[in-house]
Amino acid sequence: MISIVIPCFNSEANIGHLVTEVKRASASFKESELILVDDASSDHTWSNILLETEKDSWVKGIRLAKNVGEHKALYVGICQTIGQYVLTMDDDLQHDPEDFSKVVEKLQEGNLLVYGAYEKSAHGFFRRIGSFWNGLVASALLQKPIHLHFSSLRGIDKKLIKKIQGYDSRFFYLDGELLRHVKGSPSVVAIKHRASIFDKSRYTFLKLILLHFSMIRSGFQKIQGRKEDYSPVAEATFSLNYE
């Protein structure tokens, strides 16, 4: 069973196309599910998610009561998965769902954590500089291998998910929590990077700063071996449409 989790924010115009592409790419999997997490969008994202769930029970929806950010939204969705392997990606289709099969192959080889690495980045100059700096900080604090570049296209084994369920931090950084429980270097596969369907990034400067702070805090927790009991599920009520 393959579970696919996608956080969605103000992406009303893209939901139908997103579901179509993901389902087409998932056709080769014997069993799969798609979980869309609406991170308290201010447009009609949730209404469009509900339309997709009504058309196909393969699609599940979660609606958060308030905006908690991409990483916490992912955490909520991941905690609801039933698959042996969990795949994540962004809602702007910068990732090609056809690359899912490469990630699943690596998971089936016994890797607990797999990242997609862009063959060629479609990000602008300043975004690449920011990613490079984040990578250096992550290598120093999270013991991330210097050659490993985080992307939102991930593959996670259920055994690893069980280790992070039940707790996180107010400044939650998913990759930090995952790396905390992985021995050695995660596996990497080459993936395509497409231009975002959105005109501009939904990450404001403030959100990027907060994400960077979350990564730093997660790194210090890893160094100190501490973990905080805090659950966005308990804080943000959500709607599940499981049958």
Image (cartoon, rainbow, N blue to C red):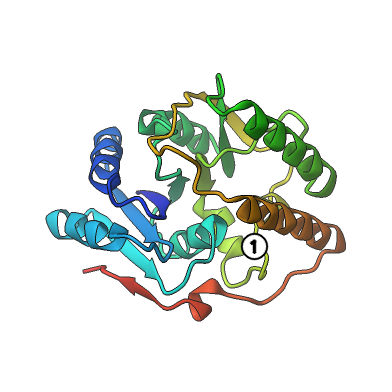
User: Residue drawn at (46%, 46%), measured in percent from left and top?
Assistant: 88
Q: Secondary structure at mark 1?
A: loop
Residue at the (32%, 60%) spot, across then down = 43
Seen from the viewer's position, the closer of residues 234 and 202 is 202
Return the x and y of residue 191 as percentages of the image width and height: 49, 25
Is residue 177 shown left or right of residue 76?
right
- Count of marks placed on residues: 1
The residue sitting at the left extreme is: 55
Determine the image quadrant of residue 127: top right
Mark 1 neighbour class, 10 Å CA radius: few under 14, some 14 to 19, many 20 or more: many
Q: Is residue 94 left or right of residue 36?
A: right
In what quadrant of the picture does the C terminus appear?
bottom left
Q: Position of residue 188 (x, y in %)?
A: 60, 30
Q: Quadrant of residue 231?
A: bottom right
The front one of 201 and 231 is 201
The amino acid pointed to by label 1 is Phe
Residue at image mark 1 = 172
Residue, x 52% and y 32% (percent of image)? Answer: 106
Q: Is residue 111 visible?
A: no
Question: Front-most of 81 and 146?
Answer: 146
Looking at the image, residue 98 lies above or below residue 159:
above
Q: Is residue 79 visible?
A: yes
Residue 133 at what x, y percent from top left?
76, 37
Residue 91: image x %, image y %? 40, 45
